């Protein structure tokens, strides 16, 4: 199936989250302010107590907890995720701090329409185990003077799909991974909204 953007008046966004949800929040805020012509239609988390789900509820967005606890069989979990996103008529699936791999049914159903943000300049400092402060510790250990954030298409592996957009962050005066993380997270918020604006405007075409 081919989806051309803009395909309707507004993009319908589905979020997959695990913990904080600050990237999701920045996108919600941009939708509410009118900066981004899109509607958040569902937020799914594998963590029922996550701040991300609380943020979505506060914004009046339908939420779902889907995890190995709700669906012990990975195939069933994948199927219910794909069906939930479909039934909400999601155009673009936005991973925002989601820590799990996406199953084959969901990948197939939303082929080329699942995007993720990663807190480094991929392909540097990505892949299995590279999440949270580990990314920024690796950046400092490598002696990088510049880090940044990447929005990319999601495939069956971690952090390997085609890059859609990147932004650089000067980290020369950062002494700790926490400092790098804070600076990069701020840049992530802007980059994710900017990338979705490009998608909504048809300047970036998804699958
Ligand atoms: C972000 O740094 C994002 O790049 C990474 O996980 C973090 C999620 O933060 N994938 P939040 O949940 O959006 O606050």
Image (cartoon, rainbow, N blue to C red):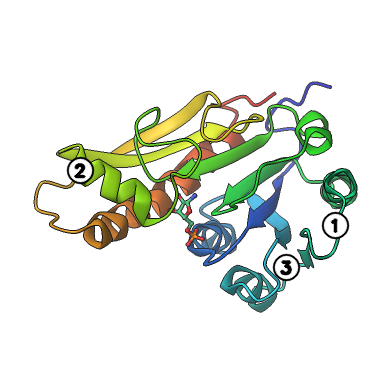
Q: Which residue is under mark 2?
A: 141
Who's the residue at 49% across and 64% down the image? 22
Crowd class of label 1 (few under 14; some 14 to 19; many from 20; radius 10 Å): few
Which tag, 2 or 1, sits closer to the chain's start?
A: 1
Looking at the rendering, in which quadrant would you find the C terminus?
A: top right
Which tag, 3 or 2, sits closer to the chain's start?
A: 3
The answer to whether residue 169 is visible is no
Please name whichever residue, 65 or 201, is drawn nearer the observer in this view of the structure: 65
Q: Which residue is under mark 1?
A: 72
Q: CA distance from mark 2 to mark 1?
A: 38 Å
Label 2 SS: helix
Lateral position of residue 165 relative to residue 45, left or right: left
Crowd class of label 2 (few under 14; some 14 to 19; many from 20; radius 10 Å): few
Q: CA distance from mark 3 to mark 2?
A: 40 Å
Q: Which residue is under mark 3?
A: 61
Lateral position of residue 38 relative to residue 83, left or right: left
């Amino acid at each position: 199936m081919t989806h051309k953007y803009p395909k309707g008046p507004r993009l319908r966004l589905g979020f997959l989250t695990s913990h904080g949800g600050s990237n999701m929040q920045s996108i919600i805020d941009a939708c509410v302010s009118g900066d981004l012509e899109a509607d958040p239609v569902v937020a799914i988390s594998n963590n029922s107590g996550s701040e991300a789900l609380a943020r979505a509820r506060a914004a009046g967005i339908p939420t779902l907890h889907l995890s190995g606890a709700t669906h012990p069989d990975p195939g069933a979990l994948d199927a219910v995720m794909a069906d939930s996103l479909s039934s909400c008529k999601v155009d673009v699936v936005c991973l925002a701090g989601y820590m799990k791999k996406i199953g084959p049914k969901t990948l197939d159903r939303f082929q080329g329409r699942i995007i993720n943000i990663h807190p480094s300049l991929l392909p540097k400092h990505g892949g299995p185990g590279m999440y949270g402060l580990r990314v920024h510790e690796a950046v400092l250990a490598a002696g990088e003077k510049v880090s940044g954030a990447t929005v990319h298409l999601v495939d069956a592996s971690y952090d390997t799909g085609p890059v859609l957009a990147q932004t650089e962050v000067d980290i020369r005066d950062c002494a700790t991974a926490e400092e790098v993380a804070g600076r990069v997270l701020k840049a992530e918020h802007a980059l994710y909204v900017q990338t979705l604006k490009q998608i909504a405007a048809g300047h970036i075409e998804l699958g």
